[in-house]
Image: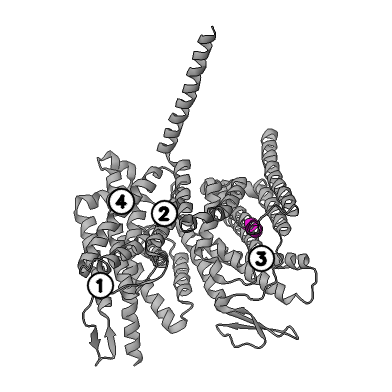
Amino acid sequence: MIRVSFLSNLINGISLGSVYAIIALGYTMVYGIAKMLNFAHGDVIMIGAYISFCVTQYLGLPAWVSVLASMLVCTLLGMTIERLAYKPLRSAPSLAVLITAIGMSYFLQNIAQLIWSANPKSFTSVVAFEPLRLFGGKLIVTDEAIVTVLTCVVIMICLTLFTEKTKMGKAMRAVSEDKGAAQLMGINVNMTISVTFAIGSALAAIAGVLLCSSYPALMPTTGSMPGIKAFTAAVFGGIGSIPGAMLGGILLGIIEIFGKSYISTELGDAIVFAILILLLLVKPTGLLGKKVNEKV
Amino acid sequence: MKKKNNKTFISNLITYAMVIIAFVVISIMQEQKLLSYSAKQLLVPVCVWIVMAVSLNLTVGISGELSLGHAGFMCVGAFVGAVLTIITKKTIDNEALRLIIAMVVGGVAAGLTGVIVGVPVLRLRGDYLAIVTLAFGEIIRNVLNLVYVGMDQETGALAFGFNNPNLPGKLIVNGPQGVQGITRISTFTMGFVLIIFALIVVLNMTNSRAGRAMMALRDNRIAAESVGISATKYKLMAFVTSAVLAGMAGALYAMNYSTVTGAKFKFDTSILVLVFVVLGGIGNIRGSIIAATVLTILPEMLREFSDYRMLIYAIVLIMVMLATNSPAFKQWLDIAKEKITGLFAKKKEKGDTANE
């Protein structure tokens, strides 16, 4: 029996971790290229979930259409935010950009509150097939968990191929390495940053839909805590590194679920943060982060 | 050299004068009953947020370390201070004295937490430091959510419990419900005293040998270390001082309400204080004071827009950041200024020729 509950926790952890990983990918890509912490990322997740909710609930369209619609809206939203709020500040001190991102986060939360009110909406899951029953029905793997993990793996593979094989991906890596040199090589830096935001926001939309499929209460503040956790995951894995975000996200999800079920429900978050601190003290750039040598 | 000292002296004098004049004016208005109820409610919070902003400016502005967990120290100060006032209610009659003791002990407790957090954390740099301070802030809040303290009504004996509410006596700290049954003894005068205290500490520290060492470390850590400035020592000094002041502000804040819960000191609160610091100008103490005052009052002023209030707040925040930092916007502003002055100049010229 103990083994079954352990497995069930592990599956929940991996499923939650996959959501964190998808969000963390957005954080880490934007950080790698624009060197900014995009605090509004968590709120893009929330907007994505709301769009999907509206499309299925009010327009009565099938779930896959709603996911596509929310990806489209979030992509446009991400690019607009970048164009209006972050692009004018490209040469400004990083703290100024951070505060602007925080302002953007407030803005999105309040817009959502005006449109959809602060009352939680109950999100209907976008996946609806029979959950998997193993060990004679003792271990139930929910359909959401299966889809979440699969999506995460597919996204990971696509993103790796994209950054390694395509021209745009190469441009992204070049910009994250050295903006000035990339520009001299004829790379359109602004366009590259824009595309990064677009990809990050589209991923955020998927993450929002998956998150709310597993945890159905949808509110204007739904995105903020997963956003912070995913940011923690990105740092955990080494910020700026795509496999790092993936690894960090999944580890963090597992730690959170195990902490909550074996140690204390209330201390779940504290355990996650404590492990992050311990890791950073031993390895200050995260699990897979590159050590940057200081130049004098 | 002499001249420069004079300049900072005058600048500091202006800061003190500003606070004192504001205090005198508001006190007179209060005497004359010119303040509305909601304005009076704002007095202590404004003082608290000013102290928070000034103290965070020491870490972020002077020492140059981005901290996102400042509310954690405030939380420690608030809990310790609040519990202390409840315990000493029978032994110390004088409310002001009780408040001062609570603030001092709250500050010391927050300072100790600052040492515990600071020693390991200050080894990290930049964004990593930011995320770890954020993590510590959340841990402090999460742990305090599980603390229970019971007090026997007669003997005053205390019983502590962790994640265990079954304690003898009446619960004064009740886990997620926080500290209950606080007497509201915070006053505007005490808030003013705390602001002046914080200003004396921060301004003197900035203009001392230690402050110069901190700024040198901020501007170029390697160069500063190579001339023998200990990075750990001065960074820790700034961090702990700032934690002590935040703890004192927390105690003052707690005593302004009848209950205080951990939920009030979330990550959002740390961000709010950071917004004050950045909007006021990083490293500029006077700016912090003004920004904290304006941004605490602004949401109340916008109350008539009710639903749109926080939306407007967000837009104002973004616009201010764009206006003060975007080169394109600055250029546009310069051109506009030139055009206006040009217009005036032309008119003047025309007027001159007409006179001839």
**What chain does mark 4 sit on?**
A
Q: Residue at x 48, y 41 (%)?
A: B324
- Give the residues drawn in magenta, as a range: B38-48
Mark 1, mark 4: which one is toward the viewer? 1
Q: CA distance from mark 2 to mark 1?
A: 28 Å
Q: CA distance from mark 1 to mark 4?
A: 26 Å
Could you tell which of marks 1 and 4 lies nearer the N-terminus? 4
Looking at the picture, which amino acid does disc 2 mark? Met
A167 magenta-colored? no
Is residue A49 among the parts visible in the rendering?
Answer: yes
Q: CA distance from mark 3 to mark 2?
A: 31 Å
Q: Which mark is residue B256?
A: 3
**Badge 3 element:** loop
Looking at the picture, which amino acid does disc 4 mark? Met
Up-down: is A17 above or below B32? below
- Quadrant in which the N terminus of chain A is drawn: bottom left
Up-down: is B261 above or below A80? below
**What chain does mark 3 sit on?**
B
Looking at the picture, which amino acid does disc 1 mark? Val
Looking at the picture, which amino acid does disc 3 mark? Asn
Please give the residue where the numbered disc 2 appears in the rendered image.
A104
Q: Nearer the viewer, residue B89 or A280?
A: B89
Callouts 3 and 2 in the same chain: no
* Crowdedness near tag 2: few (<14), some (14–19) or many (≥20) residues, C-alpha within 10 Å: many
Q: Residue at x 49, y 59 (%)?
A: B129
Q: Nearer the viewer, residue A110 or B106?
A: A110
**Badge 1 element:** loop
**What chain does mark 2 sit on?**
A
